[in-house]
Image (cartoon, rainbow, N blue to C red):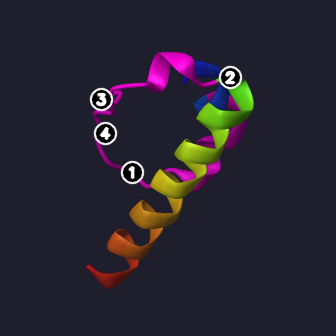
Amino acid sequence: MREYYRLHKALFPPLDINIIARRGADKLDYQGVCKELDRVVERLAGITRSC
């Protein structure tokens, strides 16, 4: 999570964000985590644009 944020900091809106891992997250490799976080960032971008 920390590495993803460091590499994609500009994509995150200026909000406080808590990310809670779902069941099975411990089974994901780094690429799987990145894919899931990409989806989160896309949803956040849509939410902040509509506000």
Which residue in the protein does label 1 denote? 14
- Per the rendering, the mark at residue 20 is 3
Q: Are marks 3 and 2 in contact (CB under 8 Å)?
A: no
Span highlighted in magenta in the image = 6-28
What's the CA distance linking mark 3 and mark 2? 17 Å
14 left or right of 28 in image: left
32 or 12, which is in the foreground?
32
Q: Are marks 1 and 3 in contact (CB under 8 Å)?
A: no
Which residue in the protein does label 2 denote? 29
What's the CA distance linking mark 4 and mark 1? 9 Å
Of the two numbered discs 2 and 1 in the rendering, the one whose residue sits closer to the viewer = 2
50 left or right of 39 in image: left
What's the CA distance linking mark 2 and mark 4? 22 Å
Label 1 crowd (10 A; few <14 / some 14-19 / many >=20): few
- Kind of element beneath mark 1: loop
Q: Position of residue 25 (x, y in %)?
A: 46, 25
Amino acid beneath label 2: Asp
From what the image shows, is residue 44 above or below residue 16? below
16 left or right of 11 in image: left
What's the CA distance linking mark 4 and mark 3? 10 Å
Q: Earlier in the sequence, mark 3 or mark 2?
A: 3
Q: Which SS does the magenta portion mostly show?
A: loop
Which residue in the protein does label 4 denote? 17
- Kind of element beneath mark 3: loop
Of the two numbered discs 2 and 4 in the rendering, the one whose residue sits closer to the viewer = 2
20 or 28, which is in the foreground?
28
What's the CA distance linking mark 2 and mark 1? 28 Å
